[in-house]
Image (tube, rainbow, N blue to C red):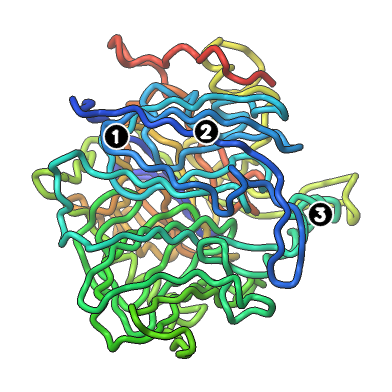
Amino acid sequence: MASNGGSSFVSGLFFLVFGLVPLVSLQAEAATKKYQFDVQVNNVSQLCHAKQIVTVNGRFPGPTIYAREGDRVVINVSNHAQYNMSIHWHGLKQYANGWADGPAYITQCPIQTGSSYVYDFNVTGQRGTLWWHAHILWLRATVYGAIVIMPQLGTPYPFPKPDSEQVLVFGEWWHGDVEEIVKQGNAMGLPPNMSDAHTINGKPGPLFRCSEKHTFAMEVEQGKKYLLRIVNAALNDELFFAIAGHNMTVVEIDAVYNKPFTTSATLIAPGQTTNVLVYANSAPGRYFMAVRPFQDVPIPVDNKTATAILQYKGIPNTILPSLPQLPSPNNTAFALSYNNMLRSLNTRNFPANVPLKVDRNLFFTIGLGKSSCPTCLNGTRLSASLNNITFVMPQIALLQAHYSNTKGVFTPDFPDKPPEAFNYTGCTVDRKPFHHSRNKTKQNRLQFDGVGNFDPAKDLAKYNLVDPPERNTVGVPTGGWSAIRFRADNPGVWFFHCHLELHTGWGLKTAFVVEDGPGKDQAVRPPPKDLPSC
């Protein structure tokens, strides 16, 4: 089935996640924020198990980066761990500066053990919550942290000013060494063991054994309002989140303001961020904040509930917290309804700017199957594809090959549509998120509830061309599709991949090559002198 109607379509068996980039001039009050990231191995003990994990500066999660719109950010990453390392600044605009984007073997060769690399970028045209994470192997299981971008001085939030703010980062936890678990799965040609717990700010909460000291808590005062900056850093799970006794007002997604709406629970895919306002207007007490996976197909997931505590000032710790009513794990109706409530703010100061003219239509289908693996225990391994093509990681970075015109590294012949038509959504597997590192202008999702195969005769009329949500990571529903539009106005090579680490490892990824434009500021910058070599 060919695509029509001027959009990119993702149709298929999973839930996927993507990302892109905008542009704004630097302000006079811009500052330079400098950070030192030491990648190192630390001993940790959690849930009755002790092990070593890779961290940044010995912290799990890693440090939060704070900047203001218009700032320059300079981060020196020194690798003291036994693994090669690269770090991706997820959702940040990197106009003509892919060298600072971070995906290993896409925009850079990894930072080798004992070496350093400086990520140097400007924060232009963005404010809100984003995050950073390792972008090689499964190291982002423990190497991640939040990015908080404050508005320019004198620019208020387009929603009630909170009395305080709190970062909440969701993650996954394995009792064993994650890289060894992945190797074992690969050797058998099977998925690695699922995680043993989820975490909130690195802690699973008191519903798990040996976790009394591993619970995050935040104190609130009666009558005040709080902005929660939420990041889903889980590797493979889309998560419901709720707070007992409290509703939330969603005000921002993926560092883009949205039309505020109130909800009892949120749904956040891996790679996505969400800001919510919470009013401390319930009876003073202790309330659980809880996360649990959403999975609407019958495959095994870590469905345990991780918790943190919202505690009113003056309430003793002896009071037992109450649990929120989370949506059921397979509540597809809630997922579709929630996503359909997301709309860009689309005001004079924060316009949606939906591209109305389309120059090229792309129709991507997602596949999952088995391929031959002579070294695997059963002779096969799982593989994934876009338009029947499974991505194979190169030996040097694609951006380096593109910039230096090195031949034989990649071919620019990825098909605009699948090689042949079939029932693309007839055999559903699960939901997935797709992330696209970034073109500088907006990525607008035009349709949230495309279930079944895309039908241009019926579905074009459903597009929201006024205020669709703008995201860097887009979810594609199980047995359905998503339509997105973006401008390819950021020269370089940009990664486009499923943000479930499981599927990325199976080859569910590709890259966009955006050629230089005619203007002097429309070309990829020269690479920095300390760019790692392969």
Query: What is the three-letter code of the residue carrying label 1?
Result: Pro
Q: Amino acid at mark 2?
A: Gln
> Distance between the Cα atoms at labels 1 and 3?
40 Å
| Residue closest to the eye, 403 or 6 | 403
* Alpha carbon separation for disc pair 2 and 3: 39 Å
Which of pointers 2 and 3 lies earlier in the amino acid sequence? 2
Residue at x-position 42% and y-position 40%: 362
Report the residue marked by disc 2: 36
User: Who is closer to the viewer here, 97 or 502?
Assistant: 97
Q: Are marks 1 and 3 in contact (CB under 8 Å)?
A: no
Answer above or below: position of 88 versus 503. above
Amino acid type of the residue tagged 3 in the rendering: Gly
Tell me what residue is drawn at x 22 percent, y 62 percent: 162
Question: Which residue carries the number 1 mark?
Answer: 22
**Quarter occupied by the C terminus:** top right
Q: Is residue 407 left or right of residue 357?
A: right
Can you tell which quarter of the image residue 301 is in? bottom right
Q: Which mark is residue 414?
A: none
Q: Earlier in the sequence, mark 1 or mark 2?
A: 1
Q: What is the CA distance from the residue labelled 1 to the residue labelled 2?
A: 27 Å
Considering only vertical position in the picture, is 510 above or below 109? below
Label 3 sits on residue: 189
Q: Earlier in the sequence, mark 1 or mark 3?
A: 1
